[in-house]
Amino acid sequence: MFKKTFLILLLSSLLLQASILHFKKYEKTGTQKGDTLLVIGGIHGNEPGGYFAPSILIQHYKITKGNLIIIPNLNFDSDIRNKRGIYKDMNRKFAYISKKDPDYKIIQDIKKIILSPKVDLVLNLHDGHGFYRPKWENVIFNPKAWGQALIIDQMSIKTPKYNDLGKICKTVANKINNSIFKKKHIFGVKNTKTKFRDEQMKLSLTYFAITHNKPALAIETSKNITDLTKKVYYQLLTIEEFMKVMGIKYKRDFDLNERNIRRLLREYGSLTINNRFKINLNRVKNYIGFVPLKRKFNKFDFTHPLGAVIRYKNIYQVMIGNKKITRLKSEYFKLSDRHPLLKIKTDHTIIDITDKLNVGIKKNFMITAPKNVRVNVIGYTSKRYKNEANIWIKLKDIDKRYSLYKDKRAFRVEFYDDKNRFIKTVLVEIQ
Ligand SMILES: [Zn+2]
């Protein structure tokens, strides 16, 4: 009993240090000057519409007039675990937070951004329960529900701009309601009258903003809409309407419809590990063994704003938001600081791969490397050679099960120095 309590205390004190991941901040500035909208996503980790919508905003929108500041993943540790708040509800920490709270730094940093003089309006994105209706219909559709609503703390605030929150939200809701999939998805405006009524909401992000004279509100799509695509569509539609209200001009590289959002939500980009191994996350298999990593301080670079890794001992779960993309099983090595001259011979051509992490080939190939470099073609086993440099590798001799990708056409060629330190992986892709 004592032991168990001790362990829990130990674990919670470890947890209490600080969040593991911090949020990212993106800024888009138009060539024409104008107002600034701050979009905050991912405060609640089990509300994926709230973080995938800003990730599309970051990747596929261009601002031509005014400015957009986007935080896609305020509660990143919780987002990638699909939990509301692994350090408890972050949206209840804005009135007071202990310095010992793991979210302390995140809250301090986001408050600074919210209060920066340049920010004219703040949107906080959520997926809420049920469908908000001004009058009680049933347990799903009622005034206590949060879904499909713009949530304001009060009708108006005393600021030079965007002070008439109630009216602005009505206008925006009317616009969105012209483009909904189903009648029951209709958006409303919910005033929580926080100052007089809602003790819990007094601790929230938007109320913090309001009480510091910064116009702010929340967009809530419904948790009862289970299709992520539709929730992201509604979030983007709403954000666009607010940009229009603010005179912010934008372009996007796709038409805003369900099919395109579904497609964009499946684009995971790439992951580069320690600048030595690059993986296309759209094609990768769901498990990769023997990945050369350092024991600590590996650098995982994602092109996707919601990319992160959760480590369980020697398994590294690769996440894009709350989506599990693949698992890497590590094989620990030291990293080499050598930068040898490397080439691949194939089909009468020689390609320099000294500075490459992938190369396309059509036929059998041969890797050339200096004598003190060991080459290992994963999936190829030679009885004669320990070092697979300077021998012709026939494609038919590579075991296709070792392909990095589901399409069975990409193989890892790994390079090690004479002290068995890892140099890099070059992905050989059969075209
Ligand atoms: Zn929420």
Image: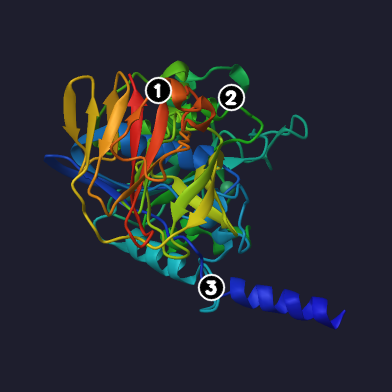
Residue 7: x, y in percent? 74, 76
Q: Earlier in the sequence, mark 2 or mark 1?
A: 2
For the question of whether residue 153 can be seen, the reply is no
Residue 113 against residue 48 in the figure, above or below: below
Q: Secondary structure at mark 3?
A: loop
Q: Secondary structure at mark 2?
A: helix
Q: Earlier in the sequence, mark 1 or mark 3?
A: 3
Residue 219: x, y in percent? 49, 41
Residue drawn 53% across and 73% down? 97
Q: How is the image coloured?
A: rainbow
Residue type pointed to by label 1: Leu
Which residue position holds label 2?
Answer: 185
Residue 37: x, y in percent? 31, 46
Residue type pointed to by label 2: His
**Cα distance between the residues tagged 2 and 1:** 54 Å
Residue drawn 25% across and 50% down? 371
Label 3 Cα neighbours within 10 Å, binned few <14 / some 14-19 / many ≥20: few
Q: Which image quarter holds the C terminus?
A: top left
**Closer to the observer: label 2 or label 1?**
1
**Residue 396 appears left or right of 9:** left
Which residue position holds label 1?
Answer: 395
Residue 258: x, y in percent? 47, 19
Kindly give the residue lying farthest to the right in the view shown.
1
Residue drawn 35% across and 63% down? 419
- Residue 119: mark in rendering: none
